Image (cartoon, helix red, strand yellow):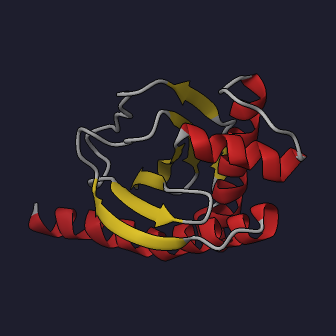
Amino acid sequence: MITQTKTKAESTTNLLNPIIGSVLRTFERMLQCVPRRSGLELKHKDSPKFPLSAIVALTGDMNGTIVFSVSEAVSLEIVHRLLGEVVHEINSEVCDAVGEIANMIAGSAKAELEHLNLTLGIPNMVVGTGHEVYYPPEVAHPLCIYFESEMGQFMIEFGFRE
């Protein structure tokens, strides 16, 4: 059992840098923003802490989920930077834009992890405070990566199983 837990932890760690790199690349290229990682922790009941989350499933040699979670202010700024439009509340256009950034993040990570033969799912959006994303018990304990940027704070949460 200790070996199995260690293997799950190693698998999660091997995914960390490609996911962080994909976030940085996507924000720099698509949003002209340079975020910096501000924290890393195991997922707990209160995460994601932001009210808008895009959930992207990846399947292949490993199966998992990447969750991109943002505040309302960050989501509105994403629309402004992507589309040049000013919006004042979360609507379908905001959800589409946040989902597209999540898809780009997952796609960039997938490219770095090509040896896993991953396929991306369509981003699913969840809007509302206090939502929680559940992972199957076979998933190594999911991680939360926090970022700071000129746009505001956001986070990536992910968990995979072999």
Residue at the (53%, 27%) spot, across then down: 126
Q: Residue at x 89, y 47 (%)?
A: 84
Which sits in the foreground, 5 or 101?
Answer: 101
| Residue 91 position within the rendered picture, expressed as x and y whole percent measured from the top left | 71, 23
Q: Quadrant of the C terminus?
A: bottom left
In which quadrant will I find the N terminus?
A: bottom left
> Would residue 113 be seen by someone viewing this image from the given angle?
no
Q: Does residue 16 lie above or below 93 as drawn? A: below
Total numbered labels? 0
Return the residue found at the far left.
2
Question: Would you say 66 lies left or right of 40 here?
Answer: right
Q: Is residue 22 visible?
A: yes
Q: Nearer the viewer, residue 71 or 132?
A: 71
Compared to 142, does 90 lie above or below? above
Left/right placement of residue 68 relative to residue 32 reads left
155 and 115: which one is in front? 155
**Residue at position x 65%, y 36% from top?**
123
Q: Is residue 44 above or below residue 30?
A: above
**Residue lying at 58% horizontally and 64% vertically, measured from the top left:** 116
Q: Residue furthest right?
A: 84
Residue 24 picture location, percent across and down: 63, 72
Indicate left or right for 52 with 162 as reference. Answer: right
Q: How far across and how far down the image is residue 58, in percent?
A: 58, 48
Instruction: List x then y, in percent, for residue 77.
Output: 70, 48
